[in-house]
Amino acid sequence: MGGIFGVVGKDNCSQTLFYGTDYHSHLGTENGGMAVLGERGFLNAIHSISQAQFKSRFVDDYKELSGHIGIGAIDDESPQPLIVRSKFGTFAIAATGLVSNKDALTEQMLREGLSFGEMTGGGVNTVELVARLIGQGESVVGGITKMQEAIEGSICALIMTSEGIYAARDRYGRFPLAVGVRKGTESSDLVVATEASSFPNLGFELLKFLGPGEIVLLSPGGLRNLVPAGSEKHVCAFLWVYTGYPTSSYEGISVEAARERCGRAIARNDDVKADFVTGIPDSGVGHAIGYAIESGIPYRRPLVKYTPGYGRSYTPPSQEIRDLVATMKLSAVREVISGGRMVVCDDSIVRGTQLRNLTIKKLWDNGAREIHIRPACPPLMYPCRYAFTTRTISELASRRAIRAIEGQDIENVDEYIDSTSKKYQEMVEWIRRDLNITTLKYLDIKDMIEAIGLPEEQLCLYCWRGR
């Protein structure tokens, strides 16, 4: 996971860059960085944020990084932004997404005599690989197009040159990229970001969402369209279910409103008797509010997140760190839990280990009478091919269930995807017993699609359907 932010202005942009990049901290926990172009040329700062929040690591850097153009990144895989010298001149680059054929492309480029200087965990830095691919084009725009055609996966990129910032959304628009303009101006200050929710508090308003494969140039002279948007779009549905910040919107659809609609849909198809509804903080809260509104069952808070110190438990790369964050960030309120029958809404069940060992255990240990888990999406069946999140099938709770039922891993899981089949019911029941909960009921994929509000063919549903 990750997010990128860029700003172009007439004056020093470092403060806007600092806070704009920080507004992407919910998308990653490992690496952060900023780069600027000013009187002293290209400058950058990159730090690990695994043990400290972005603001605390970069509060001194942004005061030194003076420039009128800047880009920043939060990313779990690659330290960035990088400064690269090329035949186009020097440029800085930030990119987010996944290159699933990274190893093959790296070997091919090594055979052609190219070398790599940035190494991450013993491997090539993905952002440097993207920069090398761009450098093979006849121009920056041609290089971006060449890169998007070469990779398998999905990459959104910002390339900062002396002209301004080239912003490119991935070919099929799986992840967002939005452009904003300072309020009260036409084009003097521009920003571009993964999260449009970063704009309002910085004094910017949304100008446009880039379309699939669209490339634009942000410069002091304004916004120039360089490559038009493609016609084929497959936006990641998980943006609305989990990944996106509640105040964000994608393709004009509010994240919070979509989550409330998911919760309403769960409640309409549920007949469980409960004393209250709750959502696992933070991403389950919107779903639970929708459930409470639709069902008339009151919303309460048996679990409270200690927000100042802990981020998301899904994003860290190691299970050990994920478990630690999940353990420490949620505090139980015994007076609310004890004796209660509760509907617990969550965005999803990915691995299920944190939910079972940490969250559910806290509820039982504090006297819960019944626990009814209601995920706001169907069982995840495939690891994402387009972002650095789940990496193997064996991680997923649904696949552990299938393995237990079948006695082995199987390739064709169509029966388990079909929510009307007996196999699907067996899988859900296995997961329920494994989680040690009273009942478990997932949101159907058709209801999830309707709640999001985009046509099915414009959504990426790979992690549920495998296509």
Image (cartoon, rainbow, N blue to C red):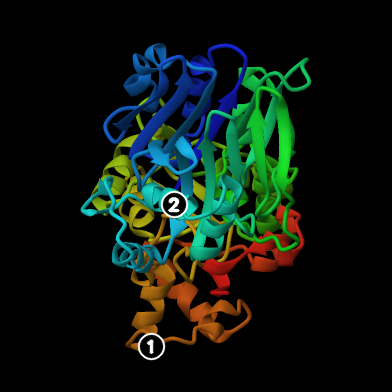
Under circle 2, the secondary element is: helix
Mark 2, residues whose alpha carbon is within 10 Å: few (<14), some, or many (≥20)? many
Q: Amino acid at mark 2?
A: Val
Residue drawn at x 49%, y 51% is 134
> Which is more toward the observer, 466 or 35?
35
Q: In the image, which disc is placed on residue 148?
A: none
Q: What is the C-alpha distance between the residues marked 2 and 1?
A: 41 Å
Q: In the visual, does 208 lie left or right of 242?
A: right
Residue extending farthest to the left is 122
Residue 462 place in picture, x, y as percent: 56, 68
Disc 2 target residue: 130
Q: Amino acid at mark 1?
A: Glu
Mark 1, residues whose alpha carbon is within 10 Å: few (<14), some, or many (≥20)? few
Residue drawn at x 34%, y 14% is 60
Quadrant assignment, res 108: bottom left
Q: In the visual, does 108 lie left or right of 211?
A: left
Can the viewer see residue 409? yes
Q: Quadrant of the C terminus?
A: bottom right
> Which is more toward the observer, 281 or 367?
281
Residue 305 place in picture, x, y as percent: 42, 33
Relative height, residue 144 to residue 92 (above, below): below
Quadrant assignment, res 420: bottom right
Relative height, residue 452 to residue 64 (above, below): below
Residue 139 place in picture, x, y as percent: 57, 48
Residue 201 place in picture, x, y as percent: 62, 19
> Which is more toward the observer, 78 or 417?
78
Can the viewer see residue 347? no
Residue drawn at x 50%, y 62% is 153
| First reached walking from the N terminus: tag 2 or tag 1 | 2
Relative height, residue 29 to residue 409 (above, below): above
Disc 1 target residue: 406
